Amino acid sequence: MNMSQRRVFIIHGWDGHPGEGWLLWLENELKNRGWKVVAPQMPNTEIPKIEEWVPFLSGLVKDPDENTFFIGHSIGCQTIMRYLESLDNKKVGGAVFVAGWFDLIGLETEEEKRIAKPWIEKPINFEKIKNTTDNFLAILSDNDPAVELSKNKKMFEEKLGAKVVVEKNQGHFDENEEMPKVLNFLN
């Protein structure tokens, strides 16, 4: 039995930072429970790129194992999935996707559409992701202005076998100060 310390990587969203709302709350709660928490400021967060974010996360994780967990918000979920997809014959403990998506609605500017395009269009190898763990939780809201519920819920369930929790009136989860469901998943 590998008794190495449990680690969790908390990856914020587009134009976000690790000190916002529930991300900071979660980091503190987990540290108080003895977890090693890594909650980085992701590079160039106003223009997130797959080819920057995924290697950045990989460099932080280094050697993942079954005591390694991931929490993502929005584009952070995409980053985690694309990182897990890159692992060969490695197992991790699990991942929580908060306001995760495979497609976005409500993109307003041409620049937003241009930034989001590769994340939406570059295929994801779900079989490779499922080989890393079968422990996925997706938390979605029924009124998220960026994430259409039914399509994304179906994708998380069918493609990843994720347990999906639908919250009422939580928007894109960027106003939340706490996320007890995420904490419960890790305990």
Image (spheres, grey):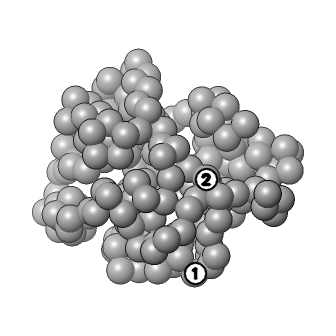
Furthest residue in direction top, as rendered: 168
The residue nearer to you, when weighing 19 against 141, is 141
Mark 1 and mark 2 in contact (Cβ < 8 Å)? no
Furthest residue in direction left, as rendered: 110
Q: Quadrant of residue 17?
A: bottom right
The residue nearer to you, when weighing 111 against 60, is 60
Q: Earlier in the sequence, mark 2 or mark 1?
A: 1
Q: Is residue 54 left or right of residue 147?
A: right
Q: Which residue is mark 2?
A: 93
**Residue appearing at x 44%, y 32% in the figure:** 163
**Residue neighbourhood size for the residue with mark 1, other residues' Cα within 10 Å, grouped as few (<14), some (14–19), many (≥20):** few
Residue 45 seen from this side: no
The residue nearer to you, when weighing 97 against 3, is 3
Q: SS for tag 2?
A: loop
Q: Quadrant of residue 67?
A: bottom right
**Residue appearing at x 41%, y 80% in the figure:** 52
The quarter of the image holding the C terminus is: top right
The quarter of the image holding the N terminus is: bottom right
Q: Is residue 58 above or below residue 139?
A: below
**Residue appearing at x 78%, y 61% in the figure:** 2
The residue nearer to you, when weighing 104 against 152, is 152
Residue 38 seen from this side: yes
Disc 1 residue type (three-letter): Gly
Disc 2 residue type (three-letter): Gly
Numbered badge on residue 74: none
Q: Which residue is mark 1?
A: 59
Q: SS for tag 1?
A: helix
Q: Is residue 171 left or right of residue 154?
A: right
Q: Is residue 21 left or right of residue 111?
A: right
Q: Is residue 15 left or right of residue 69?
A: left
Q: Is residue 183 above or below residue 125?
A: above
Residue 116 % position (x, y):
23, 62
